[in-house]
Image (cartoon, helix red, strand yellow):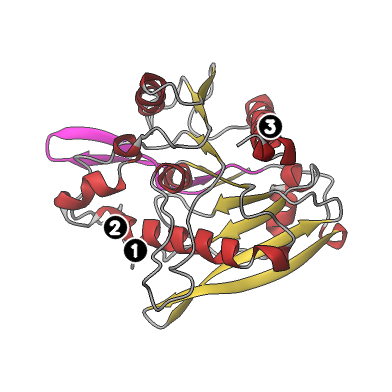
């Protein structure tokens, strides 16, 4: 487990809870020599810098892929792909090709920009799916905390691409087929504004609805698994309950697994439970049989 900054956000006289960065990871039998690694694939540029993701392909790859949002507090930190191979080995062990995706990081870039970046990453991966040996219709996305927020934005606010764009990446759809979000902030209304400690939230208040997953629940949304601890003091479990209820109202496929006694970030048995649920969700919804039914 690697845990980055966790903290409280105070806005005016109201205290709202937001995690800065937690990446939920584990150990596995998967070793870097057992997988094919393509590091630092460039999917775009901004401010003179490259936006990148890695491609981790296990020997038993079966054509389904999972985008892992490298984000927390909308900070996105580079790590050697061999480290990710060990941290997310529980997915590689099951034959999933994994794409650790980095976005333009705080403090330089803000939440709306992070959303735009990861949406472009989905398009780029779908455009190059054949070369990665994955089915573009069998892609899932996951993340924890801010990474969970970005995962939900990808799942709930996808589009079919812009056919009129001069950018070949922008022409590609941004759909994903399944989402797993650990303890995600789902409603950012009331959180935007200047903050030395949370610089990614320094954007216009008028844009808060555009980055609140709760407001994008529609009848065409993919299956969503939410995992949240009932002792989470940083991102209240109410965020997950509200999203589940909104999806239930439209009779969408959504599941909220509450881990009793778990705080923000999972360790030990809580971590093992979350990983097992994640693998099961993706195995069910990214299988070739599942795709053939739609």
Q: Name the residue at 36% across, 29% down.
A: 239
Q: Quadrant of residue 212?
A: top left
Classify 10 Å Cα crowding around label 3: few (below 14), some (14-19), many (20 and above): few
Label 2 SS: helix
Spatial distance from mark 1 to mark 3, Cα to Cα? 37 Å
Depth order, front residue of 221/28: 221
Q: Earlier in the sequence, mark 1 or mark 3?
A: 1
Q: Which residue is mark 3?
A: 284
- Percent x, y of residue 253: 51, 26
- Percent x, y of residue 168: 48, 74
Classify 10 Å Cα crowding around label 2: few (below 14), some (14-19), many (20 and above): many
Q: Are marks 2 and 1 in contact (CB under 8 Å)?
A: yes
Residues in magenta, as a range:
4-25
Q: Name the residue at 22% across, 40% down.
A: 189
**28 displayed left or right of 149:** right
Depth order, front residue of 160/34: 160
Q: Which residue is mark 2?
A: 199
Spatial distance from mark 2 to mark 1, Cα to Cα? 5 Å
129 relative to 17, above or below: below
Disc nearest the viewer among 2 and 3: 3
Q: Is residue 23 magenta?
A: yes
Q: Which residue is mark 1?
A: 107
């Amino acid at each position: 487990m690697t845990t980055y900054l966790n903290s409280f956000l105070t806005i005016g006289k109201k205290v709202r809870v937001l995690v800065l960065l937690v990446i939920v990871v584990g150990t596995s039998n998967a070793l870097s020599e057992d997988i094919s690694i393509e590091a630092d694939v460039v999917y775009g540029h901004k401010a003179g810098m490259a936006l990148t993701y890695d491609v981790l392909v296990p020997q038993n790859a079966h054509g389904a892929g999972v985008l892992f949002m490298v984000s927390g507090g909308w900070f996105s930190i580079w790590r050697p792909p061999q480290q990710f191979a060990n941290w997310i080995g529980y997915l590689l062990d099951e034959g999933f090709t994994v794409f650790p995706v980095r976005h333009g990081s705080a403090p330089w870039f803000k939440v709306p920009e992070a959303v735009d970046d990861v949406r472009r990453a989905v398009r780029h991966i779908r455009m190059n799916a054949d070369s990665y040996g994955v089915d573009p219709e069998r892609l899932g996305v996951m993340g924890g905390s801010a990474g969970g927020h970005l995962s939900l934005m990808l799942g709930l606010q996808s589009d079919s691409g812009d056919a009129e764009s001069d950018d070949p990446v922008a022409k590609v759809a941004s759909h994903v087929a399944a989402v797993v979000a650990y303890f995600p902030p789902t409603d950012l209304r009331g959180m935007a504004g200047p903050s030395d400690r949370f610089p990614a939230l320094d954007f216009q208040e008028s844009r808060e609805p555009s980055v609140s997953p709760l407001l994008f629940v529609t009848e065409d949304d993919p299956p969503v698994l939410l995992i949240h601890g009932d002792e989470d003091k940083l991102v209240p479990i109410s965020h997950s309950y509200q999203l589940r209820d909104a999806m239930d109202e439209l009779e969408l496929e959504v599941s909220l697994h509450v881990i009793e006694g778990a705080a923000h970030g999972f360790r030990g048995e809580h971590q093992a439970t979350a990983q097992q649920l994640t693998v099961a969700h993706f195995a069910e919804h990214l299988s070739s049989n599942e795709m053939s039914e739609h």
